[in-house]
Amino acid sequence: MNFELKALAATQIAPLNVDVLIVLVPDEPTWSDAGPILAPLLRTAHEDGLLEKGAGKTVACFQVHGVKASQLIMVRCSSCEPAGIRTAVGAAASLLKHPRAKRVGLVTHLLKLTPEAVASAVQAVAHATYVYTSTKPSAKARHLERCLVLADQTGHLKSGLQLGRARVAGVEFAREWANRPANHATPSMLADAARKLGKAKDFRTQVLGPKQVEQLGMGAFLSVARGSAEPLRFIVMEYNGAARTDAPVVLVGKGITFDTGGISIKPAAGMDEMKFDMGGAASVLGTFAALAELRPRINVIGLIPACENMPDGLATKPGDVVTSMSGQTIEVLNTDAEGRLILCDALSYAARFKPRSVIDIATLTGACVIALGGVRSGLFSPDDELARQLQQAGEDALDPCWRMPLDDEYAEGLKSNFADMANVAGREAGSVTAAKFLQKFAGGMRWAHLDIAGTAWKSGAAKGATGRPVPLLLEYLQSEAKHQAPVSSKAKSRSPASRA
Ligand code: BES
Ligand code: MN
Ligand code: ZN
């Protein structure tokens, strides 16, 4: 969908050639700001109590005299903050079901928009109108073609539009890939998607197969893939937006394209949802898609270990001991704790980039869903500054996370009589013990872990991927880029991977 800003005097709103007008109405408006045709209408709706205070209250009218658009939706927005705008615009946009609604205009003349609010409005329209189509082409693809954000003046809002577009591109990329069923999102297919992204200027993608992964000594990753007929892929993506000497941020995404649990098999009910177990990988792909739009001055590496976790004659058995790339041995007490096994080797691989920070993103534990639900992702990091930055990025992008503890006492349960560690501890604090396991592979790196098991997808009638935490990651990368000095095109050359 096409998002644009359009500077428009209030008198020009009514004659504007769109199918639908959405008018944002704040708590204490100056009615005349909406122009002579809309003002009396809005005022009446307000005085009749149809637009009670509280974000998201809507009134829809059709064929309003003097208004070119066939539908007019008024919506109350209780604040001009991005969160309030998101609620209001989301409520109005969810009414855009009619196939003739191809062009929509968002009237913001009654409020003072910030660039952040524009970004959030754009996201809300996209979110409310997204339709999954990869394996359901009959689901009518989104009919909305164009969304114009209308304001008196738009010059100061351009950066917000750009940010909104990039977030939408990234979130929709992640949603579409995470929504695909496992037979339409195999490790090889994820690799192909990454290769496509790698064709853009300053992007590069490299894909390793089982032989190369074995040569690297990634015994933990290999042990998860053993039970599957689908060959594993290790995807290495690069975006070079800064000088070659500039240390990159590394993003590591869990890419389990289907998690049966392996020999420690999961119950049948709801197992289909384990197609979303590559939500971390999808968020890395989505973030790269967004980087292609925003092109911030920063270097970013994306690492995706991708495979299926299946039971089979060749599958890893409970009690098997495997050797990770780091040399540490792991007793696999539960083959369903597979995410940490693929991530630990990817973290070891990350060290070669001498990153300024490493963030892994994973649908890692059911325990995190119990702890935080679908509102906030779990954030784990021993580094206070990195944790603060990520928490702030989540707040700013309306994609929040919450810091969890990493006291060493939590690692007690990972002790094993037969290896350097076990891959599971007891039932208690399951999301924390998983993070403690990963921490053993973060070495001296500035590392953070995001457990997105509760936030990456929704269950029930609205079953589907959310595209989180793409907005958080993008916000963090942008804030990191702001600390960067501008680069001359000479200083900027080959890829950071070529240093490896
Ligand atoms: N992919 C799951 C985590 C998960 C479970 C995400 C439910 C979302 C909803 C992960 O691989 C897993 O199976 N974790 C186990 C770990 C346990 C065996 C220590 C879990 O959380 O039950
Ligand atoms: Mn599992
Ligand atoms: Zn899993």
Image (cartoon, rainbow, N blue to C red):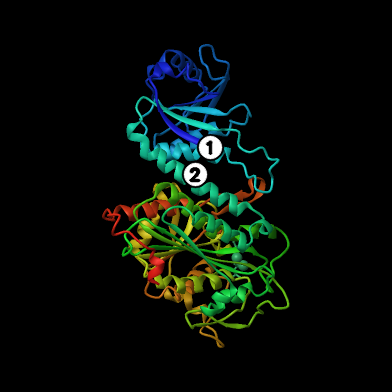
Depicted 314 relative to depicted 52: above or below: below
Residue 27, image x, y percentages: 41, 27
**Ligand 1 contact, mark 1 (Cβ < 8 Å):** no
157 in relation to 222, above or below: above
Q: Nearer the viewer, residue 233 or 182?
A: 233
Using the numbered discs, state the Cα–Cα distance from disc 2 to disc 1 in whole angstroms.
10 Å
Q: Quadrant of residue 490?
A: bottom left
Q: Position of residue 229 (x, y in %)?
A: 69, 70
Check disc 1 and report its element: helix, strand or loop: loop
The quadrant where ligand 1 appears is bottom right
Residue that protrudes farthest toward the front in the picture: 490
Closer to the eye: label 2 or 1: 1
User: Could one spot residue 249 in this view of the protein?
Assistant: yes
Are the residues at dot 2 and dot 1 in contact (C-beta closer than 8 Å)?
Answer: yes
The first of marks 2 and 1 along the sequence is 1
Q: Nearer the viewer, residue 305 or 491?
A: 491
Quarter location, residue 130: top right
Give SS at disc 2. Answer: helix
Residue 1 - label: 1
Residue located 37% across and 36% down the image: 158
| Amino acid of disc 2 | Val
Tag count: 2
User: Which label belongs to residue 168?
Assistant: 2
Count residues near mark 2 (Cα–Cα under 10 Å), then give few for <14, some for 14-19, many for 20+: many
Q: Amino acid at mark 1?
A: Met
Query: Left or right: where does residue 385 sit relative to residue 204?
Result: left
What's the residue at 36%, 24% (across, down)? 152
Check the image and report above or below for 15 versus 372: above
Q: Measured from the top left, where is residue 131 in percent x and y? A: 61, 41
Pick whichever, 56 or 272, lies toward us.
Answer: 272
Task: Using residue 60 as the reference point, say whether residue 5 is left or right of it.
Answer: left
Which image quadrant: the C terminus?
A: bottom left
